[in-house]
Image (cartoon, rainbow, N blue to C red):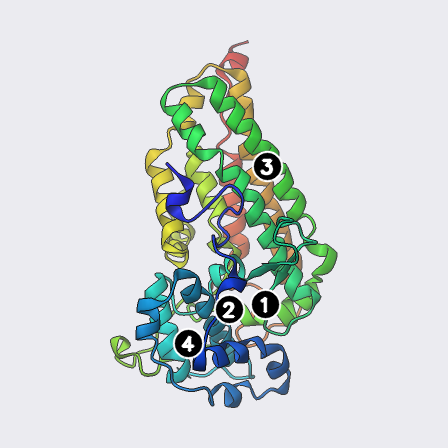
Amino acid sequence: MRLRDFGISAQRGFLSVFDPADATFSGALAEIAETAMQLPDILPTGRVRAFLGQLPQMDLTEFCAEATLAEQRVAFVHYSFMVQAYVWGEPDAPTVLPANLAVPMWQLADATGQQPLLSYASYVLDNWGQHDPNAGFDLDNVFMRQKFLGGQDEAWFVLVHVAIEATAGQLLGQFPRLLQAAEHADNTTMLSALTDMGDTWVRINAIFDRMPERCDPYVYFHRVRPWIHGWKDNPALGAGLIYEGVASTDAQPQSFRGQTGSQSSIVPAMDAALGLGHADDPLRRYLDELHIYRPPAHREFIDALRTQSGVRNAVEHSGNSALIEAYNECVQALSRFRTRHLEYAATYINQQNRNAAGNAVDIGTGGTPFMKYLKKHRNETRAQLLRDQLQVAG
């Protein structure tokens, strides 16, 4: 298993292998990208639909055939933000997405293997820049490129995720040697890899702990969260959204889940590498459904881990107390991450005191009862610690 075969690296994790700023456009597409970048100026007017309705109708068939993956995915970022702005930028959600947004959005989704609305990939993975390209992805060196309203809270929310994704690259970098060591019952190498992974999780959790520093719960709920909802299981949109001009939909409403941190590939990749499972119930099926919202190469990586990893079995049958302890520390670190996510869901969403159209306190941006979902998977993670049979026998 080689990380580069899946578009990921130990330096960037699941962040785009390209620098988003390097993707440039010409002609009408350049003007459209510029319009998208003006959303922080447009949205406060309350007339965003009239403004976006003036955009030219673009047929991106030729662009999708000839453009680089970087150009396709950055164009997808711009269009996905405009689509979300059109849907959620005025008090009542529309039933139809106009063709000048719907058709290119659908074409870009097909070209990149993603769904035709804002996903975690467009919100985070492909939506960053560095002040100093040689200084890494620390929070003092990254910025959010495409924005909705702009402001510190919106940027900080995204950039904490950017920093986590980059740091997780060091975690992913251990996977190939961990899987190979498990296959050959190489306890020494497994112990080294799991110990390094545990150390990386300490850094990931430390970054996650910083979310409240510059992202206020009230501001998040009222100024950041409203833009990232989808149109599946969302009462504000009923049956979904008609993508005008997209022939394959036969003018029928389409339903897609909104952007959510649960679309990040870090946790499912860790589950797969460690051999952790979740009970088969409606919430598990929701988790499986989110898989299609990840970039295709990331889905393939997780699928490969699920098929190839024999780590849990190798550790469990190693008879090595230190190895079992290192494995359990990784499981506990993952549980701590899920616990923090649960705590943030409570303070940033569930404890807010006002519902708005499409922005309920008890339904996640992915369209699920998120508190129950997060708590369930946290508890299932905790329940899968390995017992050291030597210590039990002693």
Q: Earlier in the sequence, mark 4 or mark 1?
A: 1
Q: Nearer the viewer, residue 71 or 221?
A: 71
Amino acid carrying mark 2 in the image? His
Marks 2/3 in contact by CB < 8 Å: the verdict is: no
Q: Provide residue 64's location: percent of width, then percent of height.
A: 34, 69
Real-space CA distance between mark 4 and mark 2, rounded to the nearest whole angstrom: 13 Å
Q: Secondary structure at mark 1?
A: helix
Real-space CA distance between mark 4 and mark 1, rounded to the nearest whole angstrom: 19 Å
- Crowd class of label 2 (few under 14; some 14 to 19; many from 20; radius 10 Å): many
| Viewer can see residue 219 | yes
What's the mark number on residue 229?
2
Q: Provide residue 389's location: percent of width, then percent of height.
A: 49, 15
Q: Residue furthest right?
A: 213
Amino acid carrying mark 4 in the image? Gly
Amino acid carrying mark 3 in the image? Thr
- Crowd class of label 3 (few under 14; some 14 to 19; many from 20; radius 10 Å): many
What's the mark number on residue 238?
4
Q: Nearer the viewer, mark 4 or mark 1?
A: 1
Residue behind mark 3: 200
Residue behind mark 1: 225
Real-space CA distance between mark 1 and mark 3, rounded to the nearest whole angstrom: 29 Å
Marks 2/1 in contact by CB < 8 Å: the verdict is: yes
Q: Earlier in the sequence, mark 4 or mark 2?
A: 2
